[in-house]
Image (spheres, helix red, strand yellow):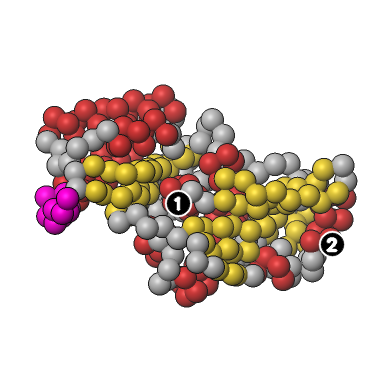
Amino acid sequence: MYEGLSSPNIHTPRNMQEYSTIILHYPESTLWAGGTFIMSRPDAYPSRKPNQEIIYLGEIDELHRFQRNDRFAEFGSMVTLDEIISTGKTVLPKVLMDNIENIGSRLITRRATIGGAIAANELTTSFPGTLIVLDTNVEIKYIKKRRLHSRWIQLTRLLDRSGHIVIPSQGMISRVRIAFSDKNYQNFSSVGSFLTDPEDSVSIAFAATLNQDVLLNPTIALTYPKMGILYSRDIDNVFSSLRFPLDDEEYKSLEMIIFTFIDSSFQGLSNLQRVRTRGILREIIDDLNEKALTMPLQEE
């Protein structure tokens, strides 16, 4: 055991008003949701940090709420990934369901929360990249002039230049709104473990409407745990310009363009991450090629 350690101070607000009071007094507090990510980090417990303040969000009822209508589903940030599967499997986008099922066993998904999966620091999880592909909006609660305010914001606007999700100071994600997608091609692929092998892991989320030989509204996000998320409308526009099926030369050109974006955004990708990225991209293009060749012709 480490010498001189004192137990952290645990705060358990039961509503947002109590939360705002606590965060005003302890602005450097660690927010604790499911704890699956925090406790998986090396030296997570016991902590070397003295006088640590932790705010446990599990007692705030409104963060556990779920509602849906004809256009979207809305989840409180404390809703677990397992609850998302059980409540929305028949209506939520396939790429989201595939992502959750890829994260791990029910031991993890029963504890991991949607808010924590988005806002985890140190390492980027695969989840926010998929939510970006789905044009997700989040509600942010934040302190301004010693009062609690809230606003809805597109998740992509929380993505900084380095590819990380950045929550405003003294802010938290309170709700997540996911639109039902009618895109007929959705793909989530991940290689490696984001928790145990972050240096060599990669995930890619992709969604588009394949209309004969073209893609309508394609969106792609590449996630590297140590580096962050690569998302660019310019890459989406490249996919919009393609005509399927692609031949080998066209694929090589696409791959070169994507890796130019990767290399200009991130430094230090491992050789294995590069190989794995190429492998996932190749699988996506091969799948799109096959679907383009077998899709029934539409009557004019």
Q: Which residue is located at x 17 percent, y 53 percent?
A: 298
Q: Which residues are magenta?
A: 291-300
Residue 20 in sight from this viewpoint: yes
Number of residues whose C-alpha sits closer than 10 Å to that of mark 1, classed few (under 14), some (14–19) or many (20 or more): many
Q: Residue furthest front?
A: 300
For mark 2, what is the residue?
18
The secondary structure making up most of the magenta span is loop
Vertical placement of residue 161 versus 89, above or below:
above
Residue 99 in sight from this viewpoint: no
Q: Name the N-terminal-most of marks 1 and 2.
A: 2
From the viewer's perspective, is the residue at label 1 or at label 2 nearer? 1
Vertical placement of residue 114 versus 234, above or below:
below
What secondary structure is found at the residue carrying circle 2? helix
Q: Is residue 9 left or right of residue 72?
A: right
Picture quarter with the N terminus: bottom right
Vertical placement of residue 87 versus 261, above or below:
below
Q: Which mark is residue 164?
A: none
Coordinates of residue 16 in the picture (x, y in percent): 79, 61
Q: Which residue is located at x 15 percent, y 54 percent?
A: 299
Vertical placement of residue 87 versus 49, above or below:
below
Q: Which mark is residue 134?
A: 1
Query: Mark 1: which amino acid?
Result: Leu
Q: In terms of depth relative to the viewer, which is nearer, 260 or 192? A: 260
Q: In terms of depth relative to the viewer, which is nearer, 285 or 123? A: 285
Q: Is residue 147 left or right of residue 125?
A: right
Coordinates of residue 47 in the picture (x, y in percent): 69, 53
